[in-house]
Image: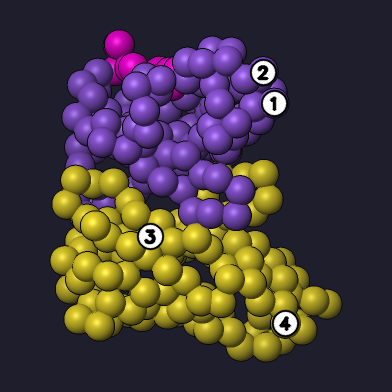
Amino acid sequence: GAGVSQSPRYKVAKRGQDVALRCDPISGHVSLFWYQQALGQGPEFLTYFQNEAQLDKSGLPSDRFFAERPEGSVSTLKIQRTQQEDSAVYLCASSLFRGGVSAGNTIYFGEGSWLTVV
Amino acid sequence: KQEVTQIPAALSVPEGENLVLNCSFTDSAIYNLQWFRQDPGKGLTSLLLIQSSQREQTSGRLNASLDKSSGRSTLYIAASQPGDSATYLCAVENYGQNFVFGPGTRLSVLP
């Protein structure tokens, strides 16, 4: 597609429910990032993939959060047993090359998946 | 751990004013600094990228400066317009290729 696509755009989950958020990066993009943005805050890094390899998951807040990118394209962020503090916008971003912007990349963000846990 | 702060948190100005948004970061060992714009319900759009070796970048009515040694960047918006209303986020890229974002400045430009 023309840009980074995320689905669902909006999700309301009951506390304790599992959710799965999908990211379709720009075709051919090697790098994929997930960020979490709480209301009124800046995005916070969750995890980074280079193709199918998850090279950095240091930002995942707990073992209830799991991300995968099995074929090096589409990625899924799964949150198990959701809690109210998980309510946030989950942003996906992709870039063509390995590495960050300093490596000559331009990073493209999706519009986010808005998760509300009630 | 890198921390990024932005001042002011919110700003409301009449159309036509020149603005300065401030960003500070605690660890000067950055690869680059980027300013993003975020509209309500939307993702992030990159405005300006300053590499660590650069001092400023300009794009149209926007000018961003970087003083790496003091851990500061400013985004200057000239002749503001209502269409400039959005949240402006500053982000630094450390080793590891992920961004550390500030909390943003919410800008309202009144017609």
Q: Which chain has been coloured yellow in this picture?
A: B
Q: Residue at x 72, y 82 (%)?
A: B13
Name the residue carrying label 1.
Answer: A118
Q: Residue at x 42, y 80 (%)?
A: B74
Q: Which chain has been coloured purple in this picture?
A: A
Q: Are both tags, 3 and 4, on one chain? A: yes
Name the residue carrying label 4.
Answer: B13
Q: Indicate the secondary structure of the residue bearing disc 2.
A: loop
Q: Give amino acid for label 2.
A: Lys
- In the picture, residue B15 is in which quadrant? bottom right
Q: Give amino acid for label 1.
A: Val
Q: On the picture, is B22 further left or further right than A68?
A: right
Q: Give amino acid for label 3.
A: Ala
Q: Are both tags, 4 and 1, on one chain? A: no
Chain letter, disc 4 residue: B
Q: Position of residue A41 (x, y in %)?
A: 53, 54
Mark 4 near mark 1, Cβ–Cβ under 8 Å? no
Q: Position of residue A46 (x, y in %)?
A: 36, 36
Q: Name the mark nearer the viewer: 1 or 3.
A: 1
Mark 2 near mark 3, Cβ–Cβ under 8 Å? no
Name the residue carrying label 3.
Answer: B91
Q: CA distance from mark 2 to mark 3?
A: 33 Å
Chain letter, disc 1 residue: A
